[in-house]
Image (tube, rainbow, N blue to C red):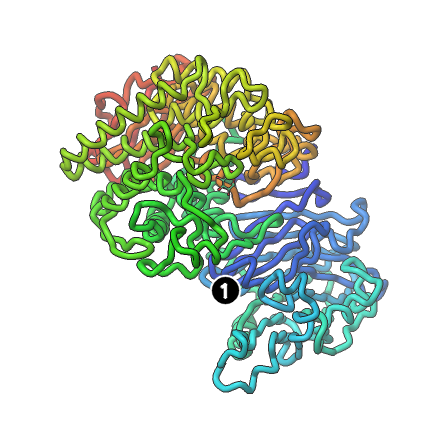
């Protein structure tokens, strides 16, 4: 079943049926001000943090309520509806609507009883408030008198938890008043006489506003219960039914902003107004509302500016292939998904809003990878930040606090850190993610000077980027397990796998192996011969250990517990086949070709499904070892044999690195949201963004996906597609092009900005190969192999590659 389509030109997903199987949402704003909005206008807003800066309320698990509601009432018939289908929910035979989710804006069109409305929700570029701009048109031939009411439900406390569960406190600190076309909601208003913003019990006055521009407010309300009316709901607010709000604010209980304007619209006429929401002091709120006096043109300009900003960001890498699903994901939606995850890490969605007060180390370092090919200058800022969260012993801080202060942080070795963050110890993999991320950045940009940039460590001292990476190697070398592979510590990538402090994870061992390959390139650049010798030696030993201990006939095992139990053996009754050690054996370069292919074949035969490869199989149920936390989940779910979508990116990459274009693309298509647009009733999640996982074949809901938007999947699949399928593999001095594509692809094109030049690449495949380069021409000149050295790039470089 389908609920909409991709408009690739406008970079929008257009929802034509509003009764989607789940709220289908979009992200608006920036790290300063975030807003999530669903196709039925449900969602919340926050300043900086979804958990601690919550402005608009949203109740999880409540059928997508409340939201940014705009009610329209015909004052003659007294009939009313909403500019989004819900909350009023008119009969869909009479109410027509479209929701266009675009890059950082969402537009909703509705037609009902001869009135056309179009509301555009957005956060203006560089601003920290939101706009709901509304154009309302009379499509009939008589004058229509309508009331338009905007409704914003403020939280009673910026901390969402206090707002939801501590009402004996939070309901008694809120108060709202009205002046100059806006509702002003105050939290702790009673502290306004305390001198100069001094805090009392860590509290100060907080101001929010809900204003109207472009029309006069006819009536207003600042009290949720007064607006809705007891025993009414968002679908039939008493204030809207009455045709006039009560002109009263709240004092205690629940604040809100509700503003009604009365419009008389001539036949064919369009009126434009805008509601504005933010967390600003009163004077600034006044200035903001006043700046929208020329409503229609200000909003139009802002929206255009926003669209061109985002389309420019995306323009740095565009493809044209025979697969519309691949194109829409790479050109727009996977890329936008990567940016959103990059901006908000995993901290704000409809399933999670950031109980943790910081950034997860591995998550953040991985997420950076998804935007490097589009916005390396943005990426490097975050890389610096994450390097500054590396402890001087080389390990990463499992949680990097929002208040991170490089050089002055406590660490998992300090009780204070453990108490504050809830993270008891270092994780085995955190700092190892730095290697591919830093490498990708330096290779994308050619900015080799970055290697020598000095960056502080989290707790004390500082060092060059090169030194930081060396310390990460030291960290693993100083924490070896019983067999001499990196120790399991608290956990590896898999949050649900506790091998024990001295256990050993094959995945981490493979990451470590790969890290050494990468660092050798940096060392070669630094002409650090003795260090290369050291790494060669360590890598050889580690490689031998992995081969001896972890290869189990046709697959790599998952690891050893600290008691010496082997996890993931082929004759185990449960969890005898794991995805990540197989893909990473190839990615890391550890597996030889034959071994790699055998392991990949096992994945294909044993783990692959029509929705992607499951994380491991069979699920844990009766034979879970003590550290197999996955058993807490239902079979076929999350880490317990779910299709953990993040891992899909790695299997795409592994197959592509082996030149298996057919397989790589098959793995892409199975889990690509866009490829499931017509199976929305099964997938449920938005068909334009990744989720954390899809239920595996052990679940009765096989194919249903969960935990939308902010997931590591966005970046791993992006890397799997860009580096893997499309084969864009830069190194310090140029670019390798090594596509692995379906045989059926005759030809495809890539437009890529690279080191100040534009590359227009055409890949031709007359012999229907999956991979392999027969000939590479750069501006007509034939290259040796598939490599383009940086020196020969021109402002407009024309590249032609013939697959063998
Ligand atoms: C979640 C976590 C991530 C972890 C993954 C696998 O996505 O955010 O840190 O690696 O699950 O357990």
> Quick check: 177 above or below 51?
below
Which residue appears at 42% of the width and 18% of the height? Answer: 660
Q: Residues within 10 Å of mark 1 (few under 14, many from 20)?
A: many
For the N terminus, the quadrant is top right
Q: Is residue 424 left or right of residue 451?
A: right
Which residue appears at 22% of the width and 28% of the height? Answer: 536
Q: Is residue 775 visible?
A: yes
Q: How many marks?
A: 1
Task: State which quadrant residue 458 falls in.
Answer: bottom left
Q: Is residue 440 visible?
A: no
Q: Nearer the viewer, residue 729 or 307?
A: 729
Q: Is residue 530 left or right of residue 464?
A: left
For the C terminus, the quadrant is top left
> Quick check: 565 above or below 756?
above
Question: Which element type, helix, strand or loop, lies under badge 1?
Answer: loop
> Quick check: 566 above or below 353?
above
| Residue 646, x across and y down, in percent | 50, 35
> Quick check: 515 above or below 137?
above
Which residue appears at 57% of the width and 74% of the height? Answer: 207
Q: Nearer the viewer, residue 215 or 429?
A: 429
| Residue 160, x across and y down, in percent | 61, 61
Q: Nearer the viewer, residue 608 or 35?
A: 608
| Residue 191, x across and y down, in percent | 57, 82
Q: Residue furthest front?
A: 563
Task: State which quadrant residue 254 falls in.
Answer: bottom right
| Residue 80, x across and y down, in percent | 80, 60
Residue to which mark 1 is pinned: 128
């Amino acid at each position: 079943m389908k609920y909409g389509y991709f408009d690739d030109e406008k970079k929008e997903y257009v929802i034509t049926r509003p009764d989607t199987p789940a709220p289908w949402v979009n992200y608006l704003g920036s790290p300063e001000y975030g807003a999530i909005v669903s196709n039925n206008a449900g969602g919340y807003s926050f300043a900086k943090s979804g958990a601690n800066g919550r402005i608009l309320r949203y109740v999880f698990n409540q059928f997508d309520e409340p939201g940014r509601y705009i009610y329209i009432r015909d004052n003659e018939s007294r009939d009313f509806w909403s500019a989004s289908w819900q909350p009023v929910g008119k009969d869909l035979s009479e109410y027509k609507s479209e929701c266009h989710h675009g890059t950082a804006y969402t537009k909703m069109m509705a037609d009902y009883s001869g009135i056309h409305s179009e509301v555009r929700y957005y956060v203006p570029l560089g601003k920290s408030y939101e706009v709901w701009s509304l154009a309302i048109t009379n499509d009939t031939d008589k004058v229509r008198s309508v009331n338009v009411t905007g409704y914003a439900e403020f939280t009673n406390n910026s901390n969402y938890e206090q707002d939801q569960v501590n009402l004996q406190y939070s309901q008694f600190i809120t108060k709202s008043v009205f002046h100059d076309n806006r509702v002003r909601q105050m939290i702790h208003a009673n502290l306004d006489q305390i001198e100069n913003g001094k805090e009392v019990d860590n509290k100060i006055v907080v101001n929010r506003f809900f204003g109207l521009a472009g029309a006069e407010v006819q009536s207003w309300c600042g009290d949720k219960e007064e607006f809705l009316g007891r025993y009414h709901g968002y679908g039939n607010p008493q204030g809207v039914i009455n045709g006039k709000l009560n002109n009263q604010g709240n004092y205690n209980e629940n604040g809100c902003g509700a503003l009604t304007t009365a419009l008389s619209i001539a036949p064919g006429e369009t009126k434009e107004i805008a509601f504005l929401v933010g967390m600003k002091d009163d004077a600034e709120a006044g200035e903001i509302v006043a700046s929208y006096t020329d409503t229609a043109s200000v909003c139009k300009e802002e929206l255009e500016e926003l669209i061109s900003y985002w389309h420019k960001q995306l323009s740095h890498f565009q493809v044209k292939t025979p697969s519309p699903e691949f194109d829409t994901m790479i050109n727009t939606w996977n890329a936008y998904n990567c940016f959103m995850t990059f901006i908000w890490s995993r901290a704000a969605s409809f399933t999670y809003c950031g109980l943790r007060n910081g950034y997860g180390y591995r998550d953040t370092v991985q997420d950076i990878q998804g935007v490097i090919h589009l916005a390396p200058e943005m990426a490097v800022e975050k890389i610096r930040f994450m390097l500054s969260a590396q402890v001087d012993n080389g390990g990463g801080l499992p949680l990097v606090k929002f208040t991170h202060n490089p050089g002055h942080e406590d660490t998992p070795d300090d009780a204070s850190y453990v108490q504050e963050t809830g993270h008891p110890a270092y994780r085995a993999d955190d700092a190892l993610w730095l290697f591919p991320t830093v490498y990708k950045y330096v290779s994308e940009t050619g900015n080799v000077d970055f290697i020598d940039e000095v960056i502080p460590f989290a707790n004390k001292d500082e060092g060059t980027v090169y030194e930081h990476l060396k310390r990460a190697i030291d960290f693993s070398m100083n924490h070896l397990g019983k067999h001499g592979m990196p120790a399991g510590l608290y956990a590896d990538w898999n949050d649900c796998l506790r091998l024990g402090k001295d256990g050993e994870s094959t995945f981490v061992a493979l990451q470590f192996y790969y890290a050494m390959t990468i660092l050798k390139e940096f060392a070669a650049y630094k002409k650090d011969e003795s260090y290369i010798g050291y790494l060669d030696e360590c890598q050889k030993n580690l490689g031998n250990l992995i081969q001896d201990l972890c290869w189990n006939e046709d697959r790599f095992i998952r690891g050893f517990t600290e008691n010496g139990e082997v996890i993931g053996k082929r004759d185990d009754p449960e969890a005898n086949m794991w995805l990540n050690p197989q893909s990473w054996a190839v990615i890391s370069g550890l597996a030889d070709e034959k071994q790699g292919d055998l392991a990949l074949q096992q994945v294909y035969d044993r783990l692959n499904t029509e929705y992607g490869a499951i994380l491991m199989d069979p699920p844990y149920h009766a034979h879970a070892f003590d550290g197999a936390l996955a058993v807490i989940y239902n079979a076929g779910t999350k880490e317990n044999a779910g299709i953990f979508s993040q891992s899909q990116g790695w299997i795409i990459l592994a197959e592509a690195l082996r030149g298996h274009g057919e397989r790589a693309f098959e793995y892409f298509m199975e889990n690509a949201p866009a490829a499931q647009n017509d199976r929305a009733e099964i997938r449920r999640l938005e068909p334009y963004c990744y989720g954390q996982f899809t239920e595996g074949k052990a679940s009765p809901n096989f194919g249903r996906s969960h935990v939308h938007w902010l997931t590591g999947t966005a970046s791993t699949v992006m890397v799997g597609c860009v580096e893997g399928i499309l084969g864009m593999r830069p190194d310090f001095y140029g670019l390798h092009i090594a596509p692995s594509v379906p045989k059926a692809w005759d030809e495809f094109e890539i437009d890529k900005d690279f080191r100040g030049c534009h590359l227009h690449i055409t890949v031709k495949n007359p012999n229907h190969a999956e991979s392999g380069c027969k000939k590479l021409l750069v501006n007509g000149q034939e290259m040796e192999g598939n490599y383009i050295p940086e020196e020969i790039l021109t402002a407009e470089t024309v590249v032609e590659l013939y697959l063998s």
